[in-house]
C-alpha cells in the first residue's frame, strides 16, 4: 500500500470535503517492543518479518515512523544489554530480513528508527571476556574497572553488576568506558554503519534515526563518566548528521525531565515529553497546561519532542484508566492532538493494559534487579483474542514455571485488532479517526501549540499553522464542565461533543476532547 492509498483511506474517515490533505503526512511514531509485536514463523517470538507483514496495518493507523527496541544479540529478553553490538538477535531474524524491512518501509514513505543502549554490555560480550583481568588486551580500556588489573568492575547501573534475567538466570552487566577515545570512535563507526550500511554515501538503504536509551550527562550519577552530552554524544551526533542531515537522534533523557540540556549540550533532535506524560497519567489539567508551556521553552525552534502516554518502561495508560472507554479515547486525543510528534506504544491503540509486578519478590528475587517484573508492560500484541493464537508473540508463555503473572488482558475482553477493526466507536477506530484529522488539517498535523486557557479540569489549546488553526478543548475531569472560554466566530467543530450551553458557556462532557478548526 503506497502512501497515497493509505492517506486516502485515512481521509475517508474525516470530514468535511473542503479541507485538503497535507503532504507528506504528518509524522506519527509507533514504538514496537520487537519480541512481542508479531510472530511470523510460529515460534512465538516477535520478529522482523512479522513487523514487515504488518506495515499495511501501521499505515492505516497513520504511522509514518516505526521505532524498534534493540535488535542486537542479547541474553536479556528485552535486548537492552548487548552480548554483541554487531548483528541481529537470531530470534528476530537476519540482516537480510532487516534490510527488507527498511526497503519496504522506505518504499511506502515510512521511516525506521533503532533503539540503542550502548552504555552497558552483558557478561558474554567480548569486551568483558577479553578485558577481565587482562588490562593489556585490545579491549583493556573499553569497560570501567576500579583497579589497574581489571579485576574489580565499577558498578554504576543501580549500583551493582548483578542482575536476575528472565527466566531465572543470574547474569552480570558492565559499564562501557565512554571516556575512552577508541570507544567513541567505535560507536561513531557502528552507528554510521546502520545509517549507511554499504558505506557508499547514499543513506537511502539505512535507518532514519536512533533512539538513545538512558541518556545522561553523568552516567547513573556515579561521578565516573561525566560531561557525556558535550564530550561523547555531541561529536558522534555531529558526525551522523554529516553523513545524513535528515537523520533523527532522539534522547530518552534518563532523568525524565524536560530535556532542555539534551538539546543544548547533546545536540539531539528530539527528546521525550515526560512532563506531558506525567500530567496525562494523573489526568491533571493544570499540570498538562504547565507542561505545554514548559515545552515551548525547553524545545528549541527546529527541533521537537515525542508526546506519549505510555511506553515500555511505564504502566500502560489503560491500566491507570481502569479501561474506561472515555478515558482511553481521551488518551488517544492527548497523544495525537497535543502537538509536536505523537508516539504510540504498540497495543496502545487497542487498549492493552499492564503494570509492573512485584510478584517475583515473594519468590526471593530482588525486584529492582529482576527484569521479569516489567513483562506485563511488554506482553504479546493482540491481533486476535486468544494470546496463544498464531501471530501473537506470547514468548513468555513458553516457560510457565518462570512466568507466573496472568496476562493483563483476557480472551474476549475486546482488546484485540480482530474485535475492534471496523467497529464504529472502538478505540482502534478512534485512533484512526484522529489520525485522519491530523492528515487533513495542517494545524493539527504540523501546528505550533499554545495554551489559550485552563480552568478547573478544562484546558483549551490552540494549534496554529500557515494554513489555519485548530482549537482543542480537553476535559480531564469525570463530570460535565463548563467555562467562559474563547472560541472564534466561524469555528467549525470537527470532532467531539463540547458545545455552547444555554448560558453561553463552553461545556464539555467528562473525559473528552473536542476539536474546532478556523480559517487562517
Image (tube, rainbow, N blue to C red):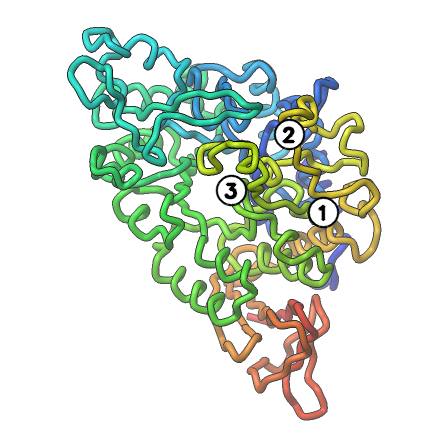
Check whether the beta carbons of the residues at disc 3 and disc 2 lie within 8 A of each other.
Answer: no
The correct choice, above or below, for 299 with respect to 154 in the image is below
Residue 123 placed where, x, y %? Answer: 39, 16
Q: Earlier in the sequence, mark 3 or mark 2?
A: 3
How far apart are labels 2 and 1 at the CA level? 24 Å
Q: Quick check: 47 left or right of 263?
A: right
Front-most of 495 and 280? Answer: 280
Which residue lies at the image location 72% right of the left edge and 72% below the top edge?
497
Q: Secondary structure at mark 1?
A: helix
Q: Secondary structure at mark 2?
A: loop
Return the residue found at the far bottom: 503
The correct choice, above or below, for 466 with respect to 373 in the image is below
Which residue lies at the image location 55% right of the left edge and 73% below the top edge?
460
Residue 431 seen: yes
Dot 3 alpha-carbon crowd within 10 angstroms: few under 14, some 14 to 19, many 20 or more: few
Q: Quick check: 300 left or right of 508?
A: left
Residue 372 placed where, x, y %? Answer: 56, 32
Q: Earlier in the sequence, mark 2 or mark 1?
A: 1
Residue 191 position by quadrant: top left
Q: Which residue matches tag 2? A: 403
Q: Which residue matches tag 3? A: 313
Q: Which residue matches tag 1? A: 350
Q: Which mark lies nearer to you, 3 or 2?
A: 2
Q: Which mark lies nearer to you, 2 or 1?
A: 2
The correct choice, above or below, for 379 with respect to 185 in the image is below
How far apart are labels 3 and 2 at the CA level? 19 Å
Residue 456 placed where, x, y %? Answer: 54, 79
For residue 396, the mark is none
Check whether the beta carbons of the residues at disc 3 and disc 1 lie within 8 A of each other.
Answer: no
Front-most of 283 and 444? Answer: 283
Dot 2 alpha-carbon crowd within 10 angstroms: few under 14, some 14 to 19, many 20 or more: some
Amino acid at each position: 500500500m503506497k502512501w497515497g492509498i493509505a492517506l486516502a483511506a485515512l481521509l475517508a474517515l474525516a470530514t468535511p470535503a473542503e479541507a485538503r490533505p497535507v503532504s507528506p503526512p504528518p509524522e506519527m511514531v509507533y514504538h514496537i517492543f520487537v519480541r512481542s509485536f508479531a510472530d511470523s514463523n510460529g515460534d512465538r517470538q516477535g520478529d522482523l518479518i512479522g513487523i514487515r507483514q504488518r506495515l499495511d496495518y501501521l499505515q492505516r493507523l497513520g504511522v509514518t515512523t516505526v521505532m524498534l527496541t534493540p535488535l542486537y544479540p542479547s541474553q536479556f529478553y528485552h535486548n537492552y544489554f548487548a552480548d554483541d553490538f554487531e548483528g541481529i538477535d537470531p530470534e528476530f531474524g537476519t540482516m537480510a530480513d532487516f534490510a527488507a524491512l527498511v526497503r519496504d518501509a522506505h518504499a511506502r514513505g515510512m521511516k525506521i528508527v533503532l533503539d540503542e543502549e550502548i552504555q552497558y554490555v552483558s557478561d558474554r560480550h567480548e569486551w568483558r571476556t577479553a578485558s577481565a583481568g587482562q588490562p593489556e588486551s585490545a579491549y583493556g580500556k573499553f569497560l570501567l574497572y576500579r583497579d589497574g588489573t581489571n579485576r574489580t568492575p565499577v558498578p554504576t547501573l543501580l549500583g551493582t553488576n548483578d542482575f536476575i534475567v528472565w527466566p531465572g538466570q543470574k547474569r552480570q552487566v558492565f559499564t562501557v568506558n565512554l571516556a575512552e577515545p577508541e570507544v567513541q570512535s567505535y560507536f561513531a563507526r557502528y552507528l554510521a554503519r546502520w545509517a549507511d550500511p554499504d558505506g557508499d554515501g547514499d543513506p537511502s538503504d539505512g535507518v532514519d534515526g536512533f533512539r538513545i536509551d538512558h541518556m545522561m550527562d553523568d552516567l547513573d550519577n556515579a561521578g565516573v563518566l561525566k560531561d557525556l552530552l558535550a564530550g561523547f554524544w555531541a561529536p558522534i551526533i555531529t558526525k551522523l548528521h554529516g553523513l545524513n542531515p535528515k537523520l533523527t537522534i532522539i534522547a530518552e533523557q534518563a532523568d525524565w525531565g524536560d530535556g532542555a540540556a539534551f538539546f543544548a549540550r547533546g545536540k539531539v533532535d528530539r527528546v521525550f515529553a515526560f512532563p506531558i506524560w506525567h500530567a496525562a497519567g494523573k489526568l491533571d489539567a493544570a499540570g498538562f497546561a504547565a507542561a505545554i508551556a514548559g515545552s515551548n521553552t525547553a524545545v528549541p525552534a527546529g527541533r521537537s519532542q515525542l508526546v506519549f502516554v505510555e511506553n515500555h518502561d511505564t504502566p500502560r495508560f489503560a491500566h491507570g484508566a481502569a479501561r474506561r472507554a472515555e478515558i482511553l479515547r481521551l488518551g488517544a486525543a492527548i497523544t495525537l492532538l497535543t502537538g509536536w510528534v505523537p508516539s504510540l506504544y504498540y497495543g496502545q491503540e487497542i487498549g492493552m493494559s499492564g503494570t509492573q509486578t512485584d510478584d517475583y519478590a515473594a519468590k526471593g528475587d530482588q525486584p529492582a534487579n529482576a527484569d521479569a517484573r516489567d513483562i506485563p508492560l511488554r506482553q504479546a500484541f493482540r491481533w486476535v483474542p486468544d494470546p496463544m493464537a498464531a501471530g501473537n508473540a506470547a514468548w513468555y508463555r513458553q516457560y510457565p514455571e518462570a512466568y507466573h503473572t496472568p496476562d493483563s488482558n483476557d480472551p474476549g475482553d475486546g482488546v484485540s485488532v480482530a474485535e475492534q477493526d471496523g467497529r464504529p466507536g472502538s478505540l482502534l477506530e478512534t485512533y484512526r479517526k484522529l489520525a485522519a484529522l491530523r492528515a487533513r488539517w495542517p494545524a493539527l498535523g504540523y501546528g505550533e501549540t499554545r495554551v489559550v486557557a485552563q480552568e478547573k479540569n478544562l484546558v483549551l489549546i490552540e494549534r496554529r499553522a500557515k494554513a489555519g488553526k485548530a482549537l482543542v478543548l480537553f476535559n480531564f475531569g469525570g463530570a460535565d464542565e463548563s467555562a467562559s472560554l474563547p472560541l472564534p466566530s466561524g469555528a467549525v467543530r470537527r470532532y467531539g461533543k463540547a458545545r455552547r450551553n444555554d448560558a453561553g458557556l463552553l461545556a464539555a462532557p467528562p473525559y473528552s476532547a473536542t476539536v474546532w478548526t478556523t480559517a487562517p
